[in-house]
Image (cartoon, grey):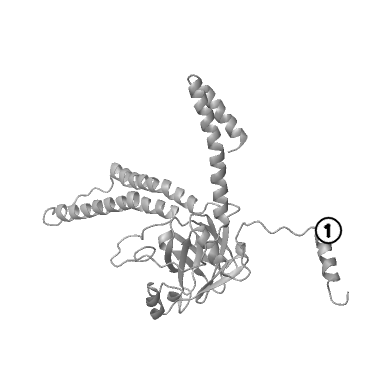
Amino acid sequence: MTLGDVKRAFGRGLMHARGGAGLLSSCVLALLAAPTAALAGASAAADRFAVAPGGYTPMKPTPGKGMPVDGGLTFQTQYSPTGQEALWMHDNIVMWILVATSIFVLALLVWVILRYNHRVNPTPSKTSHNTLLEVVWTGIPILILLVVFVPSMKLLAHQYKKPPANALTIKATGNQWYWTYSYPDNGGFEVISNILPDEEADKRGEPRQLAADNRLVVPVGEKIRIQTIGADVIHSFAVPSLWFKLDAVPGRINEKVLVVNEPGVYYGQCSELCGARHGYMPIVVEALPRPQYNAWVMTHAGAKIDGAPEAPAPAPAAAADAAASAASSAPGA
């Protein structure tokens, strides 16, 4: 909280206070809130660059979370804001329209079969046009489309909203048949991700044909700029439980925002037919709290924490003194 915020709070207390006691309490609350807000901001900034002690340990997946389940009938449980919005739209709007339309069409078919068969209705009607009926069966579908159109456009806009300028950038490259993840904001290191053999997946307690030797690790709760490109043919980066799907096209960078609400391990697959081993290039997203993410980053050579201030360059005078001191201490000087 700035000094201006304190002044505004003081003014509100002066306007709404009833007597001296109200004015005094408003002023005290404003003054107490200032250091509290400052401490909260400082704590958040410290957590942003904190590195969890003990290094990085791969997170174990939670059964049924971020993966297909036996007997599943609908979408996977969603762990991203757009996924939750899309699932709500499907369950509360689209599904009800589908059910109602299916029942209505079935009822019409049954009614036509029973009412207009040859035995019950031996003399068919000669009517060729019915203006009211044509208006109804044209107008009702238009209204249904309008009902679906409004939330659909909102969802589409939310999915492709531009990421903030300081968003962490991760580039996913589709290859035949594996993924490469690069972290330009964390020093530019790359991670190559291949499918795990079934025996190794069983040892790690991960689902077969969905586990990978190296994961796409991301910080939880942050807006992440995911960029995709294909190295050879068209691939598609898709994680169903995060409602995320983006094509990886050769010679073209596609971009989309990813936000993961909860820490966890989330599984996906390439969703574009890309060759003989198309079904063997899984995607594993591991979402970690920021300190644990920073610890994972620092396990790579040449890595750095994104957004961390750079070390200041030595002053010219200090650099000259250091060079002179090194020259004088050299043998034979």
Few, some or many residues within 10 Å of mark 1 (<14, 14–19, 20+) = few
Is residue 163 visible from the viewing direction of this image? Answer: no
Q: Is residue 316 above or below residue 57?
A: above
Where in the figure is residue 90, as x and y percent of width and height? 35, 53
Where in the figure is residue 142, as x and y percent of width and height? 37, 46
How many numbered circles are shown?
A: 1
Q: Residue furthest right?
A: 333
**Which residue corresponds to the image point at 54% horizontal and 23% vertical from the top-left?**
14
Is residue 235 visible from the viewing direction of this image? Answer: yes
Question: For the residue labelled by badge 1, is the local secondary structure a helix, a strand or a loop?
Answer: helix
Name the kind of residue labelled 1 in the image.
Answer: Ala
Is residue 62 toward the left or the right of residue 3 in the image?
Answer: left
Where in the figure is residue 260, as x and y percent of width and height? 46, 57
Where in the figure is residue 326, as x and y percent of width and height? 82, 69
Is residue 250 toward the left or the right of residue 262 in the image?
Answer: right
**Which residue corresponds to the image point at 54% horizontal and 50% vertical from the top-left?**
44
Q: Which residue is mark 1?
A: 317
Quick one: quadrant of the N terminus?
A: top right
